[in-house]
Image (cartoon, grey):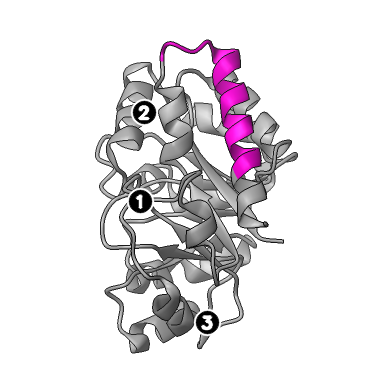
Amino acid sequence: MKNLVAYITSGYPDKNFTIDLALALGENGVDTLELGVPFSDPVADGPAIENANHKALELGFKFQDLLEISQIVAPKVDTLWMGYFNSFYQQDMKKLLPLAKEIGINGLIIPDVPHEEALLYKKLFEDNKLTNISFVAPTDSPQRIETIVKDAKKFIYMVAYTGITGSGTAEDLQPFLASIKEYTNTPVYVGFGVNEKTAKEKVQGADGVIVGSAFINILLDESLTKSQQIQACSSLAQNIKDKINS
């Protein structure tokens, strides 16, 4: 069974909606949830997620909202925090990671921290039994891929191309996947540009997919009511989960 990871922006359009959506996704095919931490300059994300980040901040998102959302969601859905390092650093990592574990968070995804800098926090993550998700990109050499993935846990975030999330860029991922799997047995999930149309193709040879912008585009559609948005996201999750396993 191949896994589906879904990203949603915490606090957009509000805290209670995020909770309802997260729980609905967990009941409709999503294996792991990325709770995105709104940030003013989400450099790895495309226009949709960037827009949702800015809207959440404009609506008054605070880090405390993430904690309150997580307390309800994490006991019921495998949950990771996805955010940029400054958001976590401002909370004091030595205090934040024990709190994350206490709440039930299973790891963090921090796209703007290079592998070498992430190693500085390796023991802190290990002491709190949390995973710091590893990234590999097409620009990484075989030697660098080997270095990055040798201690990777939970799953490896394979960037499907050099760019930002949400793009539909098509690339032959098989050589890249093979180069990763040569050095690790850790599951490899494909992210960036994965949606209902591309998921079946992109998951070939991989162990799962990571979908963000496709969900966020639904949340940005203000012609839909909140309940319609949740239903649409749930249907999308079911469809993608079916496609990657068909």
Q: Residue at x 58, y 36 (%)?
A: 236
Which circle's residue, 1 or 2, is located before the other in the chain?
Answer: 2
Give the image location of residue 140, x and y in percent.
Answer: 30, 77
The residue under label 3 is which amino acid type?
Answer: Lys
Give the image location of residue 11, x and y in percent.
Answer: 47, 25
Residue that label 3 marks: 181
Which circle's residue, 3 or 2, is located before the other in the chain?
Answer: 2
Which dot marks residue 85? 1
Which numbered mark, 3 or 2, is in the foreground of this view? 3
| Quadrant in which the C terminus is drawn | bottom right
Residue that label 2 marks: 52
The local crowd at label 3, few if under 14, some if 14 to 19, many if 20 or more residues have their Cα within 10 Å, is some
Q: Is residue 69 above or below residue 242?
A: above
Q: Tell whether label 2 touches label 3 (CB within 8 Å).
A: no
Q: Is residue 199 above or below residue 118?
A: above
Which dot marks residue 39? none
Q: Residue at x 31, y 18 (%)?
A: 58
Give the image location of residue 43, x and y in percent.
Answer: 25, 47
The residue under label 1 is which amino acid type?
Answer: Phe
The local crowd at label 2, few if under 14, some if 14 to 19, many if 20 or more residues have their Cα within 10 Å, is many
Q: Which residues are magenta?
A: 222-239
Q: CA distance from mark 1 to mark 3?
A: 28 Å
The local crowd at label 1, few if under 14, some if 14 to 19, many if 20 or more residues have their Cα within 10 Å, is some
Please say whether residue 135 is one of the residues in the magenta stretch: no
Nearest the viewer among 104 and 217 is 217
Q: Secondary structure at mark 3?
A: helix
Q: Can the viewer see residue 105?
A: no
- Picture quadrant of residue 159: bottom left
Q: Relative to residue 208, is residue 146 drawn left or right?
A: left
Q: Residue at x 49, y 70 (%)?
A: 122
